[in-house]
Image: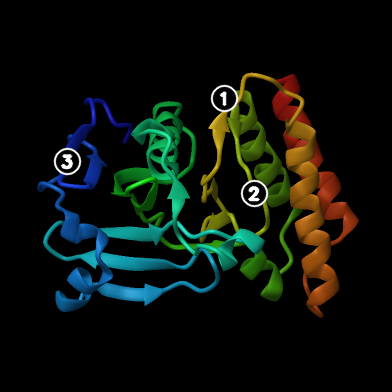
Amino acid sequence: MPTTKAPISEQYGKQHILYTADVGSPITTDWFEPSYWQQRDALSSVGTGRGAAWFIHDSEQDQDYVLRHFRRGGLIAKLSKDRYIWTGLDNTRAWREWTLLNYIQECGLPGPRPLAARVIRHGLFYTADILTYRIQNTRALSDCLTDQKLSAATWKSIGSCIRQFHAAHVYHADLNAHNILLNSDLDVSIIDFDKGRIDQSSAWQQKNLQRLQRSLTKLSGLMSGFNYCEDDWDALEKGYFSEVSS
C-alpha cells in the first residue's frame, strides 16, 4: 500500500532517522543494527557481494524486511568503504533512495516499499542504512534463467514493467538481471534504487535498456546453460514498446 501520511524524521545525537508514519511500532536506532535482529533470532539470511543485505523476519509485526548498509564500490572504496561526503541530510544516499521508493509506491509501481532510513554524521562525512519491506516469494531474473527458459509472454511482461517505471520518470542507475525479480506467478518487480532519481528527460531510457541487455549478454557468456537468447530480448522490447503505444 502507498504511504499516505507524512514520514517521521527524528534525530538522536548524530543519528538521523526517517520512517513511515504507519509503521506498527516506533523505529529506533537499534533497527539498523544486524546484532539487534540477531539477538532476537530474526535474521533469516544474509546476501552476498558489495550490496550485501540482511534479510529479517520480525515475528512481532509478522513482517519481513531487507536491511542494507550503503557501501562504496570501485577504486574509491580503497579509501573509504562506506563513508560519503556530507552536503546536507536531504542529499544523503539513504534519504534520496527512501524518498524515491516512496514516490514509486505512490505511483503504484512494483518496487520495494520503504520502511526507514538512517544517516549517521561523522563530521564532514556520513554513513547510511536503509530498511525496506521484502518483496515476498521472488527470485532474481538472473537466478531464474539458470534453471528455466522463460516464455515470450514473461519477457514481454518484463519489458512492460520497465516501461511503466520509465513513464513515471523513474531512473534506475543499475538496471541489470539481478535487480529484476519474478514471483511464482511470474509477476515482475524491480529493486535496488540506490543512486536512482526522478528524471523528467527521456535521453537516459534507451541507455537503461542497453545496460540490462549487456547484463544478460554477459551472464550468458559466463554461465553455461544460461537460458537467454536474442529472441528473448526481442520479446522484451515488444512488451516495452507496446506499453509506449498503448
Q: How many marks?
A: 3
Q: Is residue 48 left or right of residue 239?
A: left
For disc 3, the neighbor class at 10 Å (few under 14, some 14 to 19, many from 20) is: few
- Helix, strand or loop for disc 2: loop
Q: Which residue is mark 3?
A: 11
Q: Secondary structure at mark 1?
A: loop
Amino acid type assigned to the residue bearing label 2 in the image: Asp
Taking the image as shown, residue 111 lies to the left or right of residue 6, namely right
Q: Of the residues under marks 2 and 1, which one precedes in the sequence?
A: 1
**Residue 67's x, y, as percent?**
35, 60
Graded by Cα atoms within 10 Å as few (under 14), some (14 to 19) or many (20 or more), the crowding at tag 2 reads some
On the rendered image, what quadrant is the N terminus found in? top left
Q: Nearer the viewer, residue 8 or 45?
A: 8
Image side of residue 200 versus residue 57, left or right:
right
Query: In the rendered structure, which amino acid carries the disc numbered 3?
Result: Gln
Q: Residues within 10 Å of mark 1 (few under 14, many from 20)?
A: some
Spot occupied by residue 245 in the image (x, y as percentages of width and height):
75, 20
- Asked whether the viewer can see residue 74, the reply is no
In primary-sequence order, the first of circles 2 and 3 is 3
- The answer to whether residue 105 is above or below residue 215 is above
The disc, 3 or 1, on the residue closer to the chain's N-terminal end is 3
Q: Mark 2 against mark 3, which lies toward the viewer?
A: 3
Q: Do the residues bearing badges 3 and 1 touch, measured as CB atoms within 8 Å?
A: no
Residue visible at 41% across and 41% down?
Answer: 86
**Which residue matches tag 2?**
174
- Write down the quadrant of residue 205 in the picture: top right
Which residue bears the numbered disc 1?
Answer: 168
Q: Which residue lies at the image location 15% right of the left edge and 49% below the top edge?
A: 27
How far across and down, in percent of the image, does residue 171 sit? 61, 34
User: At 45% across and 60% down in the image, what residue appears?
Assistant: 82
